[in-house]
Image (cartoon, helix red, strand yellow):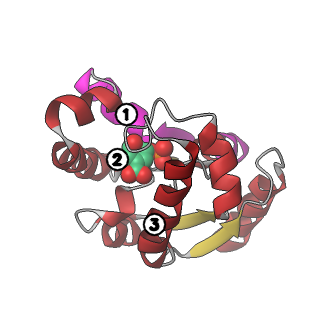
Amino acid sequence: MLICLVGFMGSGKSYIGERLAKLMSYNFVDLDTYIADNEKLTINDIFQKEGENAFRSKENKYLKVLFNEKNTVIATGGGTPCFHNNMDLMCQNGITIYLYANNTILFSRLKKERMKRPLIANTTDKELFEIIETKVAERSPIYEQAEAIFEIKNLEDDKVIDDIYNFFTFYDS
Ligand code: S3P
């Protein structure tokens, strides 16, 4: 089984994905890390040197490579499902899970983690909140095409990882 975690930046896709994979004895791949490792460039560098369109092409290319993996949890990037028909592709090739967190939670998380993320790197708090509001509204209909949605209420609360794990125990049987 291939599990694709989708959701906005800061929703905890990598944190949750890594722990979920461990629980399931699956492999874990963070798509951004996979792209950066293969391109030998940081995500910021790809955006800066080649632009967002080039990044989106690479994101699609490496996502498709990962469809060959089995027993793997993939933490996608926040924008992955919204470009190049990736959401349909993920639904066809794996099971998609949307990690939903409300805008206040996303803001408090992203406020501290802006620099690695080119879309929000140099924003003021006000701009950051506006970007979250606009992009979440724009992307939600796509995220919501996922097979299951789990709400992240408190990023330090690992209960959601057990909930997702239990969902897959049921799914498999
Ligand atoms: C992006 C999210 C990032 C990364 C890139 C673009 C987005 O991933 O792919 O900076 O468009 O929302 P994370 O969701 O892991 O931060």
Residue located at (23% from left, 43% from top):
55
Q: Earlier in the sequence, mark 2 or mark 3?
A: 2
Residue located at (84% from left, 49% from top):
157
User: Which span of residues is magenta-colored?
Assistant: 18-40
Residue 49: x, y in percent?
17, 29
Q: Give the residue number, with chain letter if any, for mark 2.
A: 66
Mark 2, other Cα within 10 Å: few <14 / some 14–19 / many ≥20 = some
Q: Earlier in the sequence, mark 1 or mark 3?
A: 1
Residue 77 makes an appearance in the image: no
In the shown orientation, is residue 39 left or right of residue 158? Answer: left
Residue located at (24% from left, 27% from top):
39
What is the three-letter code of the residue carrying label 3? Thr
Residue 149: x, y in percent?
63, 72
Residue 30 highlighted magenta (yes or no): yes
Pair 1/3: label in front: 3
Q: Earlier in the sequence, mark 1 or mark 2?
A: 1
Eyeballing the image, is 165 above or below 114? below
Residue 151 highlighted magenta (yes or no): no
What is the three-letter code of the residue carrying label 2? Leu
Query: Pointer 1 and pointer 2: residues touching (CB < 8 Å)?
Result: yes
Residue 14: x, y in percent?
58, 42
Name the foreground residue: 43 vs 71: 43
Q: Give the residue number, with chain letter if any, for mark 1.
A: 34
* Dominant secondary structure (helix, strand or loop) of the stretch shown in magenta: helix
Q: Give the residue number, with chain letter if any, for mark 3.
A: 134
Residue 51: x, y in percent?
18, 40
Name the foreground residue: 93 vs 19: 19
Q: Secondary structure at mark 3?
A: helix
